[in-house]
Structures are given as structure tokens and as C-alpha cells.
Image (cartoon, helix red, strand yellow):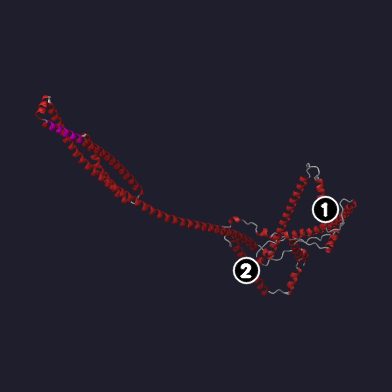
Amino acid sequence: MVIMTSLFRAKITPRASKAPLQVKNGSTLSKSSAVLNGQDFELLDQIEIQRGENRILYQKLQSKSEALVILTKELDKTRAECEEYRILTQTLHGRDAARQIGGPRALALRTNSNGLFRDLTLTNQLGELRGENKRLLAERDQLRILVKEKEADVKLLRDELGQARNDVNHRQNQISVEASRRCQDLGILVRKLELLQLKYSRLKQDLQSLLDEKEDLVQERDAYKCKVHRLNHAMSALLKSDGYKTIDLDWLLSENQFLRESLEHVQEEKQLANDMGRKYKCALENSRHRPKPPGVKTGQEEEAQMLNDQIVALLGKTSFPCPVELNLSSTDSLQELSLSLLETLNDRMLQLKHQRRANKHIMARLEEFEHKMKNDEHGHLIMNPSQYLMAGYSAANVDEEPLHDGVDSALEDLDARIVACDLSRQSSIESSVNQSPDVSDLYKRFQAINVEREDSIYNPPDIIAEGIPRVNPPQIQAPSPIPIDPETAEANEILMEDPIVLPDHLQSLVDQAMRDLEDHDE
């Protein structure tokens, strides 16, 4: 038993000696972790290490408490054995005293009955018991010392465990405080990020709106730039030619109005063709025979009824004379309606014939006027001013050419022509002042005029381009008088009775042509 206790002590003592070192190491780790408060991962690792060390110390404490329980049990057992030995020694001492009191007879009897051997045995047993008792007492003292040492170790371990718990609690409190502080900082940072996100979204929307406005302004600028470029080209073409004397805004407006009316007329014809196509399609679909149940009207009867209603409604809207009370089922009413329709159709055909003759006459005069205008120097400019002004225009070099390049060059040419004209006039005036012709000289010049060319048609003199050498245009002979046939005379009488109302743009063209013809005749 002494050997077991010594071995147990030898096993426990090094652990008890190592435990403070581990606690000290833990304290050093706690100090290092206290220095590195900003590093959470190192703190967590140190906490895990401290928890492991505490767990090891707790296991050591349990093992030592179990060893202490075993030692207390052995101490109780030795105490019981010592009590038994004490009782045994007391009984033995009592027997010796009784034997001594029994007298010489008993002693003689004892000696006679081999008492010497028994005394030796008892003496030996008593010596063994005393030695065992001394050994047990020494072992008890050793166990008491060991128990005191273990209690001191346990107390030290408890103190170290309490200190470690306090350190852990302090670290946990620090970590919780830092975590709460970090959460507050994160909350503030999140609020700042939300505000920045709102500002960013607003700035993004403002930037997008600015980009849209910029795109609109760029498109508007490009549109105005193209418009200015077109106007620049048209103005340059107008100033470089002599057409600025004859062309004006009314020509352009009339041409635009004529083109717009032509477009509307084409659209109306297209709409009419589409309506007729839909009408024929519906009629074709309705003409298909479909089986109908008995007691229901057929499609032909319904179409006949609808046709009668349409005829009655159409006759109510007509302006020509027709029967008032019309019965489509009556033959007399239908004959009367047919006669009135034929008479009206004959009148309309006669009017259409006269209208066609008048239109032919007007078209002939218009063709004649167009022929004259085409042969004129500025006829194309007068007939199609927009095509003449926009001839050779290209929108590809809008950004390359300056805005006032063509206009400036045209204005320079115009100024040069005006200066040349003024110089020529001044020189002619000076020559006329210095050398006034005689009456005989003027008479000779008048006689030299070619009378045969009086019917020729010339372009009006160009005042600005007088000083510039130019090729004279070909002479255009006056047209021969148009023979008047009976049909044309009849059409003229009809026109005098019922004048034809032309559209505004055609009427303006006809009036202008008539004025030009009167000017040429004069």
C-alpha cells in the first residue's frame, strides 16, 4: 500500500508542478491577447487555448480529487485496522493480567500445558503488531503530509482556475464591448453607405437626365445645322444665279402647297381603293352559299333588303329630280326612276364632255406656257424652284463645310457684279457727257435697227450681269396662232357662261402665265 501511494504521489507531483507553468503560459497569452485587441481571430484562438488549458486543469483537479478520495478510504481502512489491533492488544493484555492473578496453580497449569510456546507466539505476534502499527503510523503521517500537499495544490489550482475564469470573463467583456462598439461603428458606416447610395442614385438620375438633355440638344443642334446647311446651299445657288429677280417665297409656298395637295390626292385614292377592296371582299364572302336552318332568311333575301334600303337612302340624298314616292316592287316606279336617271346621266355626260374640252384647252395653254418657261433662261428655276435650289446638295459634308462658306462666296460674286455694273454705268455716263451724239447720228442708228426681228422674244436684260460677258440664249420664235375649231369655240362659250374654278396653286400659275404672255406681247 505504501508503494501504491508513493507511485501515485510520484505521478501527481509532476502534473501539479506543470499546472502552474501552463497557467503562467495562459497568463502570458492573455497579456499578449490584451495587447492585440484589434485582432479578433487571435483573441478567439487564445480563448480556445485558454479553454483547453482550463479543461486540462479541471481534469487534473478531478483526478487529484479522486486520488484524495482513495487516500481517505485507505486512511479509514488503516484506522479501522489500527482499532482492531488496539482491541486485540487490550484483550491480550487482559488475558496476561488474568493469568497473573490466577496464582501459581494456574501458572503451573499454564506452564504444564505448553504455556511457554504460547507466550513466545504471543510475543512474536505482539512485536509484529507493534512494528505494523509503527509502519502504519508513519504511513499515516506521510498520507497526512500528502493530503496537505494535495489540498495546497487543489487550493492553488482553484485560485488559478478562478483567476483564469476572471481573465476569460474580462476578455469576454472586452470582446462584447468591442463587438458592441464595432456594431455601432458598422451601423454608422451602414447609414453613411445608405446616404451615399441615395446620393449616388440621385446623381445617377441627374446625370442620366443631363445626358438625355444633351442628346436632345445634340439632335436639335444637328437638325438646325442641317437646316442651316440646306438654307446656305439654297441661298448660295440663288445668289450665284440670276434667279433672285424672278423667284420669291410665293413660288416656294405654291410649290409646297401643290405637292401637299398631290400627296393628299394620292392618299385619298389609296384610301378609296382600299375601301373598294374591302367592300368587294365582304361581298365575295357574303356571296358564298352557307346552309341555313329552316325558318331563317337566306343571304340573297337579306342582301336584296339591304340593297333596297341603300337605294332609298341614296335617292333621298340626290340633287337631281327623281320620283318622290318610290316603290321598288312596282314596274312603273322603276321605269320612271330609270328615265330620270338616264336623263340625268345624259346631262352629266354633256357637261363632262364640255369640261373635258375646256380642260384640253387649258392643258394646251399650260403646255405652251411650260414650253416657254423651259426655253427661258430661268424657266427651270421658276417651274421647280426647290429642285433648282437643292441641286447638287449633299448632307455628308455638313460638319466639314463652314456654315457661311457658300453664302460668303456668292455674296462676294454679287458684290463684284454690282461693282462692275456701277463702273460700266459710270463709264457710259461719262462717255455720253463727253461725247454727246448728234441728231444725224441718232437717226442713222435708228435706221440700222433690223425690223424683221420685232417678233422675236428676248429675255429681259440682266442689269447686274451687264458687265460680264455671257452667251446669249437661243432666240425663241413666237408661237403661231392656234386655229379655233368649232368644239373649242363651244368650250369657250361654256367657259364664259360657267367659269371653271381651279385650285389656288394652278390658278396662281395660270395668272402668272397670262401676265407673262401680256408682257411679252407688249
- Viewer can see residue 515: yes
Amino acid beneath label 1: Ile
* Vertical relation: 515 (above or below) 208: below
Q: Residue at x 87, y 50 (%)?
A: 329
Point out the residue furthest to the left here.
104
Q: Few, some or many C-alpha atoms within 10 Å of disc 1 (few <14, some 14-19, many ≥20)?
A: few
Helix, strand or loop at disc 2?
helix
Amino acid beneath label 2: Val
Stretch of the chain drawn in magenta = 83-99
Helix, strand or loop at disc 1?
helix
* Vertical relation: 203 (above or below) 291: below
Q: Quadrant of the C terminus?
A: bottom right
Q: Quadrant of residue 344?
A: bottom right
Q: Is residue 266 left or right of residue 104?
A: right
Alpha carbon separation for disc pair 2 and 1:
76 Å
- Viewer can see residue 400: no
User: Residue at label 2?
Assistant: 419
Q: Nearer the viewer, residue 347 or 243?
A: 347
Residue 262, disc: none
Q: Quadrant of residue 72?
A: top left
Q: Is residue 11 left or right of residue 449?
A: left
Q: Nearer the viewer, residue 68 or 49?
A: 68
Q: Quadrant of the N terminus?
A: top left
User: Residue at label 1?
Assistant: 311
